[in-house]
Amino acid sequence: MNTLRKIYCRVFQKAFKFALPFLPYRNPEVIGSVKSLPEILLKKKCDNVLIITDKGIRNLGLTDRLERALKGNNISYSIYDKTVANPTTVNVKEAEDLWYQSECKAIIGFGGGSSMDCAKAVAARIAKPNQSLAQMKGILKVHKKLPLLIAIPTTAGTGSETTLAAVITDAETRYKYAINDFPLIPRYAVLDPKVTLSLPPFITATTGMDALTHAVEAYIGNSTTPGTRKNALDAVQLIFENLDRAYTNGSDKEARKNMLRASYFAGCAFTKSYVGYVHAVAHTLGGQYNVPHGLANAVLLPFILESYGDTIHSKLARLALAAGVADSSTPEKEAAHAFIQAVKDMKKRFNIGDTIPEIKEEDIPKLAHYADKEGNPLYPVPVLMDAHELEKFYYILMDKKQEDTSNESE
């Protein structure tokens, strides 16, 4: 990246960091069970709600407890269950139409990050019906009160239940972009471990590593606060203590509960301190090839941490202490490498590879351009990179794919 652009990015990031104490950040009110929602809805005079989820969640019966609770309290509801991974503008339009047809008064995002992002985007469209989602992309362009928005995460990873972001994919261009504004933070977050018990092991792993990526990128960035640093460290500790347990025994309610807490803490951390190039690159892979976001983050994380070099060794050393892979007597550089190796070992245990087979070389310049556009100047990363420099991460994944193929043929 050229010098003038670097100066612009750093000035932009410092201005945002300076403004942090004055911005209207808030945390959602945390609820421990879906059974508590009817009382809240009735108190808010919301007797007709729209539930936004996906077919997989619906088929697993995960919405059943919520539906029974609503019916038992004479609360009407409609369900939109066509949300796809990396939700599209079509999903948002269909759910928005159902909101108006059913005359709903509140929105519940029930599922992973995709369902919650779709719910946020629908709420934004209802608040600003004369403005397209594309016109709201970027920072602070919603600035309107949303309908009552409740998030019920079924995966412990995205942290979307506590963030001000909704990530949407344009159905025609496959361009994936974020809408960021304070009204998008849900009013209530339901952290109910029972709705996560049916989550398959691989999704448990990739969404857990998504939460890990949130915590790590928030912690190593340049816009941290004492609060976000503590949230990130707490999240890392909880993930290293509980993710393997949840992966190997999906019915371990205590591990599931702790992973929900970890995801929530990581969400609180990156809402204020942002993420970095892992997310910028991962979002392009999700938008272009529909690669699940948690999987893309998990594959990319160690590669990008290594690329930052010694600029983040001191921070990685503190993360290593939280993860329990180093102690206070471990030299800083050694502890940093131990943390990166621990992430790689975690990937191996969860059968997460080092490749994204869908990548096509001819797409790389466009994808790197989108990643650059997302990451700069907003993300306060340790080392700034432009589109050309970001291209190497796509090639790293392709090179490894090609090497693996050639080795197999031999």
Image (cartoon, rainbow, N blue to C red):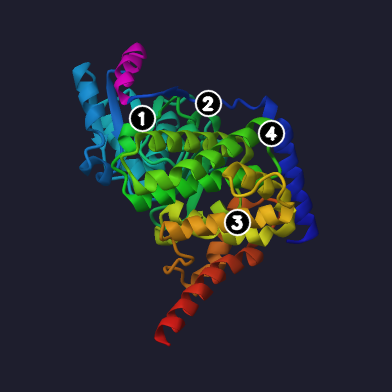
Residue 85 x/y as whole percent: 36, 50
> As shown in the figure, which amino acid type bears the numbered disc 1?
Asp
Q: Rounded to the nearest whole Å, what is the CA distance between mark 3 and mark 4?
A: 23 Å
Q: Is residue 96 visible?
A: no
The residue at which mark 4 appears reads as 225
Residue 340 x/y as whole percent: 60, 56
The residue at which mark 2 appears reads as 27
Labels 1 and 2: the sequence-earlier one: 2
Residue 193 x/y as whole percent: 35, 33
Q: Is residue 214 visible?
A: yes
Q: Secondary structure at mark 2?
A: loop
Q: Nearer the viewer, mark 2 or mark 4?
A: 4
- 43 falls in the magenta region: yes
37 or 332, which is in the foreground? 332
Residue 359 x/y as whole percent: 46, 69
What are the residue bounds of the magenta stretch?
A: 34-45
Circles 1 and 2 in contact, beta carbons < 8 Å: no
248 or 170, which is in the foreground? 248
Q: Secondary structure at mark 1?
A: loop
From the viewer's perspective, tell me whether residue 71 is left or right of residue 350. left
Q: Nearer the viewer, mark 1 or mark 4?
A: 1
